[in-house]
Amino acid sequence: MSITAENLIWRIGSKTIVDGVSFEAEPGRMLGLLGPNGSGKTSLLRLLAGLKSPQSGRVLLEGNELKTLGARAVARRVAFVEQHATTGANLSVVDVVRLGRFPHRSWLSRWTHADDRTVNEALERTGMEGRRNDRWQSLSGGEKQRTQIARALAQAPTELILDEPTNHLDIQHQIGVLKLVASLPITSVVALHDLNHAAMFCDRLIVLQKGKIVTSGPPEAVITEELMREVFAVEARVETSPHHRRPHIHYLR
Ligand SMILES: Nc1ncnc2c1ncn2[C@@H]1O[C@H](COP(=O)(O)OP(=O)(O)OP(=O)(O)O)[C@@H](O)[C@H]1O
């Protein structure tokens, strides 16, 4: 186990947003988090990243309770790209990506060639190398998204948490980001709305509805016509793709 959620409950007032969620994210694998709007995906990811505390239950990182680890220790291993990640300061793209190195450096240590290499590699992997000196504020929504993913990669995390990382991206970059995350030898937990992309790239899926896990498992067990009807409220046919052997959803009109 890399990230473990044990019976997580998070409420706002009398409303239970995350309702008894337990799962294990396996080391090095890509776990997709699915569910309709408002089902609690973002809230759950924020609990996993330690940005919110559950009213009950625990998040464990390799067996250690998240809340007993210091913020810096967590930042050294967990990278989180939020849905509307932004940065206030007037930074260049490369400066934003360099922020990813901070958890690994002390006040006195110098910026090293290894730091530069990690930053350059992150820019290349996300296709942002050619924009490195541009101002953050001048980027399009998709370019900002890719820069934030580059910042997360520069953090060299062992756990990567991404909240709808493809939502501003054109199709080339959607596929590119998912391929990249699937190829990384790290644990990832990724909220996605595109169910076909989730089925193609994730090793396992969890489906949330009203804050509870309704089903989980490998894509071929999770993505069914019944799930499409009962959880996502659409009629669809699900077939095994002859191209990648994963489930493929045909939505019906
Ligand atoms: N800070 C908050 N205050 C009040 N309600 C909140 C808060 N955060 C989340 N919620 C509510 O919790 C529910 C789940 O929200 P969340 O953003 O986790 O869902 P989601 O599955 O990520 O949705 P989406 O697919 O639309 O991004 C929603 O009904 C939302 O209004």
Image (spheres, rainbow, N blue to C red):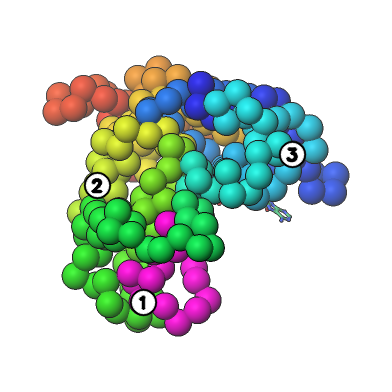
**Residue designated by label 3:** 54
Residue drawn at point x = 35 percent, y = 20 percent = 220
Closest to the camera, between mark 1 and mark 2, is: 1
> Do labels 3 and 1 touch, CB within 8 Å?
no
Residue at the spot of label 1: 92
Residue located beneath label 2 in the image: 175
Magenta-colored stretch includes residue 155: no
Mark-to-mark CA distance, 2 and 3: 33 Å
Q: Residue at x 65, y 39 (%)?
A: 69
Residue 133 drawn at (x, y percent): 27, 77
Query: Label 3: how many residues lie within 10 Å, few (<14), some (14-19) or many (20+)?
Result: many
Of mark 3 and mark 1, the one earlier in the sequence is: 3
Residue at horizontal 15%, vertical 24%? Answer: 242
Q: Which residues are magenta?
A: 82-101
Q: Is residue 88 magenta?
A: yes
Residue shown at 78% from the left, 32% from the top: 56
